[in-house]
Amino acid sequence: MCGIVGYIGKQDTTKFLLDGLKELEYRGYDSAGIALLNDEKIDVFKALGKLKNLSEKVESAKLSKYEIGIGHTRWATHGKPTELNAHPHLGEYSYVVHNGIIENYKELKEELIKAGHNFVSQTDTEVIVHLFENFQNKLNDTTEAFKNTITKLEGAFSILLISKADPSKIFFFKHGSPLIIAKGNEKGEVLFSSSDAPLIGLSNEVVYLEDGVGGIASADSIEFFSDDYSWSTLPSSKQFAQKDGFRFFMEKEIYEQSSVVSDCMLGRIQDNEISFDEIDESILEGIKEIKICACGTSYHAGLTSSYLFERLSKVKCSIEVASEFRYKEPLLTKDTLFIVISQSGETADTLEALKMAKKAGLKSLVICNVDNSSMTRTADYTILTRAGIEKGVASTKAFSTQATVLWMLALYFAKINDSISSEKLQKELHALREVPKSLIIDDKIHEKTKRLSKRYLHGHGFFFIGRDVFFPLALEGALKLKEISYLHAEGYPSGEMKHGPIALADPELFTIALMPQNLLYDKIKSNVEELSARDSTICSISPLEFELSDDFIKTQKTDHYMLEFFEMLVVLQLFSMEISIRLGNDVDMPRNLAKSVTVE
Ligand code: M6R
């Protein structure tokens, strides 16, 4: 997730770009850059880290007057956060900023190198500007060159491109990642941004571009390549805009899950296998078992994957809470692959566990959302989850992207170990591709959680129960509720009830039962019946109606338990959020918690 801005007009171009990037900094802050164009030349400024570094550079330069500019704030996906990898990217005479991932960049890069183009960065983005110039050199027609460029790209790409070959224009295209074009309040002004916050107060009329829509803008006209667009009015509240109209960042992030999981899978699912740019098959050489360490929500993602690593990859897998692992004097052997999972990459306990494993000579891998964090700098291998910045303290999209990466990793290992038939692998890949769909939120489901929430504000506690991977999901559901509602909730494997917890059952004990159709349905049904017989209030989440439920949230019928897993995840997140809202709590910044726990 990155942020892009663009400006055409006679006002202060640099100011619009820097102010705009400041608003978009939440989308990524590994590096930032701007390219400013006037008839004779393009000036470029780039800086590593937060935007203030770029602003300081720009302030100390003597700037000419520019009537066109583009800018970018980066969340690294391909290539380390360095100044060379920062956008805008240059060809011979053009610059581009890009939000998304070009899936076929390797093939394109090879072709372009053969055609004589020189590349200076490790990014996927750089191919766009070279491809454009390759076409422009042949066709001498910037419009056609841009259109040809777009048709060659695969993946997600929202882009702005400027070129000395046509210095009064910005070429734009949206596919996958968000992009807005706006008419500025001043005559001849055109503005671009990844979200509406930078545009508030500067424009009234905007087009929220749909996928596949692009065009060319100048001070005189905005030309679209198709009719698939409409102008609308911009909201006037900045706070509302930053949250894209959602009430809380948590809500926005729950709704974002479908698209960030698509980003997370981009380029990683091939026709009949999984591939990761970041690792190769040698990662399993000499490995007999996997040990996972993490905290909180990341621990729940890890626990989920421990079922998948054993079931699919046939590798022995154990998992531990990082704070426990640190002091138990663990026996570490070099035939163990040590995996840590962390949204932030900074959690002190997880980082320390990783350092211990490294010290013991184990191969290590981090599944992380933040490149260049302490963990990505420490581990031997990193796989990024590409969830974009998560602002809500209660983790949501971090979990869904972690679970997706881990499921893909289990399949990647299964292929290496030859532990999965090609028929089964195809089925798994088919299901994986459906995950973004299962994370799309049906209005009716959100409404239902909203309505139900009012009946669950009292009582003496909640049991969230499930089996197999639905047990870690139950833990995650209970953690979400605890964190933001401050109500007492526990997650349990449903088969464990009769070994003690069922003693608590009475009408004031609320049981949230995860009852997937595709995994152990009858087993969990009996466990829920036992609770119902003891008068616990039951809310079941399932595609199948269950006559003993007091409340029922109906999920879709699918043919894979992991798709049920992701859909139920969303239900649990919405349910907790709605309860928290009703209780009047601070959803995004719950009491006593911090987003990143960098102390022991
Ligand atoms: O950044 P990390 O994933 O390492 O953080 C781990 C936990 O602190 C985190 O998941 C925490 O449990 C969240 N607040 C859960 O919503």
Image (spheres, grey):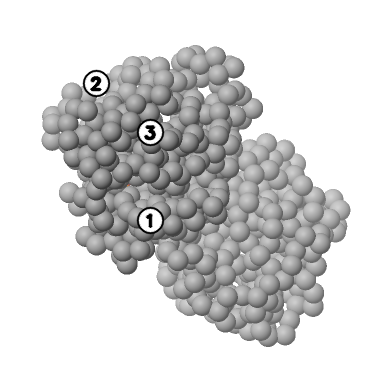
State the SS at label 3: helix
Q: Secondary structure at mark 1?
A: helix
Residue 212 appears left or right of 339: right
Three-letter amino acid code at the position of disc 3: Phe
Q: List x then y, in percent, for residue 184.
A: 67, 80
Give the number of the disc on residue 470: 3
Judge depth for marks 2 and 1 and give the one in front: 1
Whole-number angstrom distance, CA of label 2 to CA of label 1? 48 Å
- Do we see residue 43 in this rendering? yes
Q: Which x, y percent locates residue 104?
A: 66, 39
Cβ atoms under marks 2 and 1 closer than 8 Å: no
Residue labelled 2 has its Cβ within 8 Å of some atom of ligand 1: no
Near mark 3 (Cα within 10 A), the count class, few <14, some 14-19 or many ≥20, is many
Instruction: Work out whether mark 2 precedes mark 1 in sequence or the reverse, and give the earlier one.
Output: 2
The amino acid beneath tag 1 is Ser
Spatial CA distance of label 2 from label 3 is 30 Å
Q: Residue at x 50, y 40 (%)?
A: 555
